[in-house]
Amino acid sequence: MNDSATLWWDTPTGCIRYVEQTLLPGEYRIVECRTVERLAEAIRRLEIRGAPALGVAGGYGVALAAATAKDGTYKRFMEEVERAAGVLRATRPTAINLGWGIDRVLSAVSRASDTVSAKEIALAEAEAIAREDTACCHAIGEHGARLLPDSCTVLTHCNAGALACSSWGTALGVIRSAVNAGKDVKVIACETRPLLQGARLTAWELVRDGIDVTVITDSTAAYLMRVGAIDAVIVGADRITRDAVFNKIGTYMHAVCAKYHGIPFYVAAPSSTFDPENIARDVTIEQRGREELSVMGNRTFIPPGAQVKNYAFDATPMELVSAVITERGVLYPPIDPGSVAAPKQRP
Ligand code: MRU
Protein backbone atom coordinates (compact mmCIF):
# COMPACT_ATOMS: atom_id res chain seq x y z
CA MET A 1 0.00 0.00 0.00
CA ASN A 2 1.20 3.51 -0.78
CA ASP A 3 2.74 5.23 2.24
CA SER A 4 4.49 8.12 0.51
CA ALA A 5 4.92 11.40 2.35
CA THR A 6 2.77 14.49 1.79
CA LEU A 7 5.24 17.12 2.98
CA TRP A 8 8.79 16.94 4.19
CA TRP A 9 12.03 18.88 4.74
CA ASP A 10 14.48 18.59 1.88
CA THR A 11 17.88 18.64 3.59
CA PRO A 12 20.13 19.28 0.53
CA THR A 13 18.20 22.42 -0.47
CA GLY A 14 17.01 23.48 3.01
CA CYS A 15 13.40 23.92 1.97
CA ILE A 16 9.96 22.33 2.45
CA ARG A 17 8.62 20.09 -0.30
CA TYR A 18 4.97 19.11 -0.58
CA VAL A 19 2.41 17.48 -2.84
CA GLU A 20 0.32 20.29 -4.40
CA GLN A 21 -3.20 19.10 -3.59
CA THR A 22 -5.25 21.57 -5.63
CA LEU A 23 -3.92 19.96 -8.85
CA LEU A 24 -4.96 16.39 -8.00
CA PRO A 25 -6.16 14.11 -9.48
CA GLY A 26 -5.11 15.61 -12.82
CA GLU A 27 -1.50 16.31 -11.94
CA TYR A 28 0.87 15.02 -9.22
CA ARG A 29 3.32 17.85 -8.63
CA ILE A 30 5.89 18.33 -5.87
CA VAL A 31 6.40 21.98 -5.00
CA GLU A 32 9.46 23.52 -3.31
CA CYS A 33 8.71 26.13 -0.68
CA ARG A 34 11.50 28.48 0.39
CA THR A 35 9.71 31.25 2.29
CA VAL A 36 7.17 31.52 5.08
CA GLU A 37 5.03 33.81 2.92
CA ARG A 38 4.81 31.15 0.19
CA LEU A 39 3.97 28.49 2.80
CA ALA A 40 1.20 30.70 4.20
CA GLU A 41 -0.21 31.09 0.69
CA ALA A 42 -0.04 27.30 0.14
CA ILE A 43 -2.04 26.73 3.33
CA ARG A 44 -4.62 29.41 2.49
CA ARG A 45 -5.08 27.97 -1.03
CA LEU A 46 -5.33 24.38 0.33
CA GLU A 47 -2.26 23.26 -1.60
CA ILE A 48 -1.43 21.79 1.83
CA ARG A 49 -4.51 20.88 3.84
CA GLY A 50 -5.98 18.48 6.40
CA ALA A 51 -5.50 19.03 10.12
CA PRO A 52 -2.48 16.77 10.86
CA ALA A 53 -0.69 17.96 7.69
CA LEU A 54 -1.26 21.54 8.86
CA GLY A 55 0.38 20.63 12.18
CA VAL A 56 3.41 19.31 10.30
CA ALA A 57 3.41 22.38 8.01
CA GLY A 58 3.26 24.69 11.03
CA GLY A 59 6.27 22.96 12.56
CA TYR A 60 8.29 23.04 9.35
CA GLY A 61 7.18 26.64 8.79
CA VAL A 62 8.78 27.75 12.06
CA ALA A 63 11.90 25.71 11.18
CA LEU A 64 11.98 27.45 7.78
CA ALA A 65 11.65 30.86 9.45
CA ALA A 66 14.56 29.97 11.74
CA ALA A 67 16.69 28.65 8.87
CA THR A 68 16.14 31.76 6.74
CA ALA A 69 16.28 34.38 9.52
CA LYS A 70 18.83 37.12 8.89
CA ASP A 71 21.99 37.03 10.96
CA GLY A 72 21.82 39.30 13.97
CA THR A 73 21.33 39.15 17.70
CA TYR A 74 19.42 36.26 19.28
CA LYS A 75 16.67 38.75 20.25
CA ARG A 76 16.26 39.91 16.63
CA PHE A 77 16.27 36.29 15.48
CA MET A 78 13.48 35.34 17.91
CA GLU A 79 11.44 38.41 16.86
CA GLU A 80 11.67 37.29 13.23
CA VAL A 81 10.72 33.68 14.03
CA GLU A 82 7.76 34.78 16.16
CA ARG A 83 6.56 37.16 13.42
CA ALA A 84 6.66 34.28 10.93
CA ALA A 85 4.75 32.06 13.37
CA GLY A 86 2.06 34.75 13.55
CA VAL A 87 1.76 34.86 9.74
CA LEU A 88 1.32 31.06 9.59
CA ARG A 89 -1.10 30.94 12.53
CA ALA A 90 -3.42 33.47 10.86
CA THR A 91 -3.90 31.38 7.69
CA ARG A 92 -6.65 29.01 8.84
CA PRO A 93 -8.45 29.24 12.18
CA THR A 94 -10.33 25.95 12.73
CA ALA A 95 -7.81 23.08 12.65
CA ILE A 96 -6.10 23.18 16.03
CA ASN A 97 -3.11 21.17 14.76
CA LEU A 98 -1.70 24.18 12.90
CA GLY A 99 -1.21 26.24 16.07
CA TRP A 100 -0.16 23.12 17.98
CA GLY A 101 2.68 22.39 15.50
CA ILE A 102 3.79 26.04 15.49
CA ASP A 103 3.76 26.25 19.30
CA ARG A 104 5.65 22.99 19.74
CA VAL A 105 8.55 24.20 17.61
CA LEU A 106 8.46 27.70 19.13
CA SER A 107 8.62 26.19 22.57
CA ALA A 108 11.60 24.02 21.59
CA VAL A 109 13.39 27.03 20.04
CA SER A 110 12.88 29.13 23.14
CA ARG A 111 15.09 26.66 25.04
CA ALA A 112 18.08 27.41 22.74
CA SER A 113 20.83 29.77 23.82
CA ASP A 114 22.04 31.01 20.41
CA THR A 115 20.81 31.22 16.83
CA VAL A 116 22.92 28.31 15.54
CA SER A 117 21.50 25.85 18.06
CA ALA A 118 18.00 27.37 17.69
CA LYS A 119 18.00 26.56 13.95
CA GLU A 120 19.04 22.97 14.64
CA ILE A 121 16.53 22.52 17.44
CA ALA A 122 13.69 23.96 15.32
CA LEU A 123 14.32 21.53 12.49
CA ALA A 124 14.77 18.54 14.81
CA GLU A 125 11.45 19.33 16.50
CA ALA A 126 9.61 19.77 13.19
CA GLU A 127 11.03 16.45 11.95
CA ALA A 128 9.86 14.81 15.19
CA ILE A 129 6.32 16.13 14.61
CA ALA A 130 6.28 14.66 11.10
CA ARG A 131 7.62 11.29 12.28
CA GLU A 132 5.22 11.11 15.20
CA ASP A 133 2.29 11.98 12.93
CA THR A 134 3.01 8.98 10.71
CA ALA A 135 3.33 6.75 13.77
CA CYS A 136 0.02 8.13 15.15
CA CYS A 137 -1.75 7.38 11.88
CA HIS A 138 -0.54 3.77 11.89
CA ALA A 139 -1.60 3.33 15.52
CA ILE A 140 -5.02 4.86 14.77
CA GLY A 141 -5.28 2.48 11.82
CA GLU A 142 -4.55 -0.56 14.00
CA HIS A 143 -7.06 0.45 16.71
CA GLY A 144 -9.74 1.43 14.23
CA ALA A 145 -9.41 -1.61 11.97
CA ARG A 146 -10.66 -3.81 14.84
CA LEU A 147 -13.96 -1.89 14.89
CA LEU A 148 -14.83 -2.81 11.29
CA PRO A 149 -16.61 -6.03 10.34
CA ASP A 150 -14.71 -8.48 8.11
CA SER A 151 -16.76 -7.35 5.13
CA CYS A 152 -18.25 -3.87 5.10
CA THR A 153 -18.98 -0.65 3.24
CA VAL A 154 -17.70 2.51 4.93
CA LEU A 155 -18.77 6.06 4.14
CA THR A 156 -16.24 8.85 4.52
CA HIS A 157 -16.41 12.61 3.99
CA CYS A 158 -13.69 14.98 2.78
CA ASN A 159 -10.13 13.61 2.77
CA ALA A 160 -8.65 12.24 5.99
CA GLY A 161 -6.03 10.27 4.12
CA ALA A 162 -2.28 10.35 3.60
CA LEU A 163 -2.64 13.73 1.87
CA ALA A 164 -4.20 15.23 5.01
CA CYS A 165 -1.40 13.93 7.24
CA SER A 166 2.30 13.28 7.08
CA SER A 167 1.36 9.95 5.44
CA TRP A 168 -1.08 6.95 5.82
CA GLY A 169 -4.07 8.97 7.08
CA THR A 170 -6.54 8.85 9.98
CA ALA A 171 -9.95 7.78 8.62
CA LEU A 172 -8.27 6.31 5.52
CA GLY A 173 -5.55 4.92 7.81
CA VAL A 174 -8.26 2.84 9.51
CA ILE A 175 -9.47 1.63 6.13
CA ARG A 176 -5.92 0.87 4.93
CA SER A 177 -5.09 -1.05 8.10
CA ALA A 178 -8.35 -3.02 7.87
CA VAL A 179 -7.58 -3.97 4.25
CA ASN A 180 -4.02 -4.91 5.27
CA ALA A 181 -5.52 -7.16 7.96
CA GLY A 182 -7.44 -9.00 5.24
CA LYS A 183 -10.85 -7.33 5.64
CA ASP A 184 -12.99 -6.69 2.60
CA VAL A 185 -13.68 -2.94 2.88
CA LYS A 186 -15.50 -0.93 0.24
CA VAL A 187 -15.53 2.85 0.50
CA ILE A 188 -18.22 5.37 -0.36
CA ALA A 189 -16.50 8.75 -0.73
CA CYS A 190 -18.73 11.82 -0.49
CA GLU A 191 -17.55 14.30 -3.10
CA THR A 192 -17.41 17.10 -0.45
CA ARG A 193 -18.67 20.33 -1.92
CA PRO A 194 -17.40 22.83 -2.77
CA LEU A 195 -13.71 21.90 -3.11
CA LEU A 196 -14.26 18.17 -3.76
CA GLN A 197 -11.62 16.78 -1.42
CA GLY A 198 -13.58 13.49 -1.37
CA ALA A 199 -13.92 13.12 -5.14
CA ARG A 200 -10.49 14.48 -6.01
CA LEU A 201 -8.26 13.30 -3.15
CA THR A 202 -9.89 10.41 -1.26
CA ALA A 203 -10.86 8.64 -4.48
CA TRP A 204 -7.38 9.28 -5.93
CA GLU A 205 -5.64 7.80 -2.87
CA LEU A 206 -7.87 4.72 -2.73
CA VAL A 207 -7.69 3.98 -6.46
CA ARG A 208 -3.90 4.19 -6.17
CA ASP A 209 -4.03 1.58 -3.39
CA GLY A 210 -6.45 -0.69 -5.25
CA ILE A 211 -9.21 -0.19 -2.64
CA ASP A 212 -12.78 -0.30 -3.94
CA VAL A 213 -14.16 3.28 -3.94
CA THR A 214 -17.38 4.84 -5.21
CA VAL A 215 -17.92 8.61 -5.27
CA ILE A 216 -21.37 10.05 -4.45
CA THR A 217 -22.78 13.54 -4.13
CA ASP A 218 -22.93 14.57 -0.47
CA SER A 219 -26.72 14.52 -0.62
CA THR A 220 -26.81 10.83 -1.65
CA ALA A 221 -25.47 9.69 1.74
CA ALA A 222 -28.81 9.65 3.60
CA TYR A 223 -30.46 7.59 0.88
CA LEU A 224 -27.67 4.99 0.94
CA MET A 225 -27.98 4.74 4.73
CA ARG A 226 -31.74 4.29 4.36
CA VAL A 227 -31.38 1.36 1.93
CA GLY A 228 -28.81 -0.40 4.13
CA ALA A 229 -25.81 0.21 1.86
CA ILE A 230 -23.57 1.73 4.59
CA ASP A 231 -22.21 -0.24 7.57
CA ALA A 232 -20.19 2.51 9.23
CA VAL A 233 -19.16 6.15 8.82
CA ILE A 234 -15.53 7.16 9.52
CA VAL A 235 -14.35 10.75 9.33
CA GLY A 236 -11.31 12.71 10.48
CA ALA A 237 -11.40 15.86 12.63
CA ASP A 238 -9.97 19.36 12.63
CA ARG A 239 -10.57 19.95 16.34
CA ILE A 240 -12.23 18.00 19.13
CA THR A 241 -13.51 20.19 21.95
CA ARG A 242 -15.10 18.90 25.17
CA ASP A 243 -18.50 18.75 23.49
CA ALA A 244 -18.07 18.51 19.71
CA VAL A 245 -16.08 17.30 16.73
CA PHE A 246 -15.18 19.92 14.13
CA ASN A 247 -14.70 18.54 10.64
CA LYS A 248 -15.45 19.40 7.01
CA ILE A 249 -18.86 21.00 6.42
CA GLY A 250 -21.42 18.22 5.91
CA THR A 251 -20.01 15.94 8.62
CA TYR A 252 -22.78 16.93 11.07
CA MET A 253 -25.42 16.01 8.49
CA HIS A 254 -23.87 12.52 8.10
CA ALA A 255 -23.72 12.07 11.88
CA VAL A 256 -27.42 12.94 12.28
CA CYS A 257 -28.36 10.54 9.49
CA ALA A 258 -26.14 7.77 10.90
CA LYS A 259 -27.77 8.12 14.34
CA TYR A 260 -31.25 7.99 12.80
CA HIS A 261 -30.39 4.82 10.86
CA GLY A 262 -28.49 3.09 13.71
CA ILE A 263 -25.14 3.18 11.86
CA PRO A 264 -21.92 3.66 13.90
CA PHE A 265 -20.30 7.06 13.42
CA TYR A 266 -16.55 6.96 14.10
CA VAL A 267 -14.07 9.83 14.31
CA ALA A 268 -10.37 9.05 13.76
CA ALA A 269 -7.91 11.69 15.01
CA PRO A 270 -4.53 12.02 16.74
CA SER A 271 -4.27 13.55 20.20
CA SER A 272 -2.86 16.75 18.61
CA THR A 273 -6.42 17.43 17.34
CA PHE A 274 -7.91 17.51 20.84
CA ASP A 275 -8.85 20.82 22.43
CA PRO A 276 -10.32 19.90 25.82
CA GLU A 277 -9.94 23.43 27.20
CA ASN A 278 -12.65 24.72 24.87
CA ILE A 279 -16.26 24.04 23.94
CA ALA A 280 -17.84 24.39 20.51
CA ARG A 281 -18.94 28.00 20.84
CA ASP A 282 -15.35 29.11 21.55
CA VAL A 283 -14.18 27.93 18.11
CA THR A 284 -14.01 30.05 14.96
CA ILE A 285 -15.39 28.25 11.93
CA GLU A 286 -13.52 29.35 8.82
CA GLN A 287 -15.68 31.00 6.15
CA ARG A 288 -14.22 30.97 2.66
CA GLY A 289 -14.77 33.02 -0.49
CA ARG A 290 -17.87 33.27 -2.64
CA GLU A 291 -16.02 32.11 -5.77
CA GLU A 292 -15.57 28.58 -4.35
CA LEU A 293 -19.35 28.13 -4.64
CA SER A 294 -20.24 30.31 -7.55
CA VAL A 295 -17.60 29.58 -10.18
CA MET A 296 -16.94 26.25 -11.91
CA GLY A 297 -14.46 26.32 -14.76
CA ASN A 298 -15.34 29.50 -16.63
CA ARG A 299 -19.05 29.47 -15.71
CA THR A 300 -20.77 31.39 -12.92
CA PHE A 301 -23.63 29.58 -11.18
CA ILE A 302 -24.92 32.06 -8.63
CA PRO A 303 -26.44 35.31 -9.86
CA PRO A 304 -24.97 38.60 -8.68
CA GLY A 305 -27.16 39.87 -5.85
CA ALA A 306 -27.63 36.44 -4.24
CA GLN A 307 -25.67 36.09 -1.03
CA VAL A 308 -23.44 33.11 -0.29
CA LYS A 309 -22.41 31.38 2.94
CA ASN A 310 -19.38 29.17 2.57
CA TYR A 311 -18.57 27.58 5.94
CA ALA A 312 -15.57 25.25 5.64
CA PHE A 313 -16.41 23.20 8.77
CA ASP A 314 -19.24 22.25 11.09
CA ALA A 315 -19.48 20.95 14.65
CA THR A 316 -20.94 17.51 15.39
CA PRO A 317 -22.21 17.22 18.98
CA MET A 318 -20.39 14.49 20.92
CA GLU A 319 -23.62 12.58 21.61
CA LEU A 320 -23.78 11.64 17.91
CA VAL A 321 -20.28 10.07 17.99
CA SER A 322 -20.07 6.28 18.56
CA ALA A 323 -16.32 6.31 19.25
CA VAL A 324 -13.19 8.43 18.75
CA ILE A 325 -10.20 6.44 17.50
CA THR A 326 -6.88 7.91 18.67
CA GLU A 327 -3.29 6.67 18.61
CA ARG A 328 -3.67 5.81 22.29
CA GLY A 329 -6.80 3.69 21.87
CA VAL A 330 -10.55 4.04 21.30
CA LEU A 331 -12.72 6.38 23.37
CA TYR A 332 -16.33 5.32 23.85
CA PRO A 333 -19.18 7.42 25.25
CA PRO A 334 -19.17 9.28 27.52
CA ILE A 335 -16.22 10.59 25.50
CA ASP A 336 -13.81 12.70 27.55
CA PRO A 337 -11.38 14.55 25.22
CA GLY A 338 -9.48 15.70 28.34
CA SER A 339 -8.10 12.18 28.74
CA VAL A 340 -6.16 12.36 25.45
CA ALA A 341 -4.84 15.87 24.71
CA ALA A 342 -1.31 15.96 23.25
CA PRO A 343 1.49 17.74 25.11
CA LYS A 344 2.51 21.13 23.72
CA GLN A 345 6.14 20.14 24.16
CA ARG A 346 8.09 17.09 23.12
CA PRO A 347 6.82 14.13 25.27
O1 MRU B 1 -10.50 22.27 4.35
P1 MRU B 1 -9.68 21.02 4.51
O2 MRU B 1 -9.55 20.24 3.25
O3 MRU B 1 -8.36 21.30 5.17
O4 MRU B 1 -10.52 20.13 5.53
C1 MRU B 1 -9.97 18.92 5.96
C2 MRU B 1 -10.91 18.12 6.78
O5 MRU B 1 -11.98 18.54 7.13
C3 MRU B 1 -10.41 16.77 7.23
O6 MRU B 1 -11.45 15.87 7.36
C4 MRU B 1 -9.72 16.94 8.60
O7 MRU B 1 -8.73 17.91 8.54
C5 MRU B 1 -9.12 15.67 9.07
S1 MRU B 1 -7.74 15.18 8.12
C6 MRU B 1 -7.04 13.82 8.81
Image: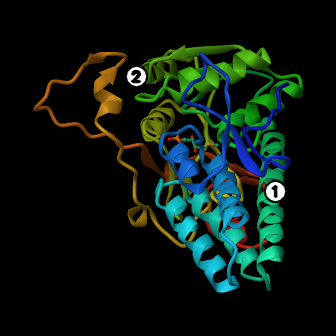
SS assignment at label 2: helix
Q: Quadrant of the N terminus?
A: top right
Give the quarter of the image for residue 138.
top right
SS assignment at label 1: helix
Residue density around tag 1, few if under 14, some if 14–19, many if 20 or more, within 10 Å = some
Quarter of the render that holds ligand 1: top right
Which residue is found at the position 59% from the left and 58% from the top?
A: 98
Q: Earlier in the sequence, mark 2 or mark 1?
A: 1
| Front residue (pair 211, 200) | 200
Q: Quadrant of the C terminus?
A: bottom right
Q: Which residue is farthest front?
A: 71
- Residue 90 spot, x, y in % from top left: 46, 60
Say the numbered circle drawn on residue 219.
2
Residue density around tag 2, few if under 14, some if 14–19, many if 20 or more, within 10 Å = some
Which residue is found at the position 83% from the left and 59% from the top?
A: 128
Q: Which residue is farthest left?
A: 305
- Residue 47 spot, x, y in % from top left: 56, 37
Look at the picture and state if 293 lies above or below 121. Answer: above
- Residue 287 spot, x, y in % from top left: 35, 47
| Residues at circles 2 and 1 in contact by the CB criterion of under 8 Å | no
Which residue is found at the position 58% from the left and 63% from the top?
A: 99
Q: Is residue 91 left or right of residue 290?
A: right
Can you see residue 147? no
Can you see residue 177? yes
Q: Can you tell which of label 2 and label 1 is closer to the viewer? A: 1
| Front residue (pair 278, 208) | 208
Tell me the amino acid under the disc marked 2.
Answer: Ser
Say the numbered circle drawn on residue 127.
1
Q: Is residue 52 left or right of residue 208?
A: left
Color encoding of the figure: rainbow
Tell me the amino acid under the disc marked 1.
Answer: Glu
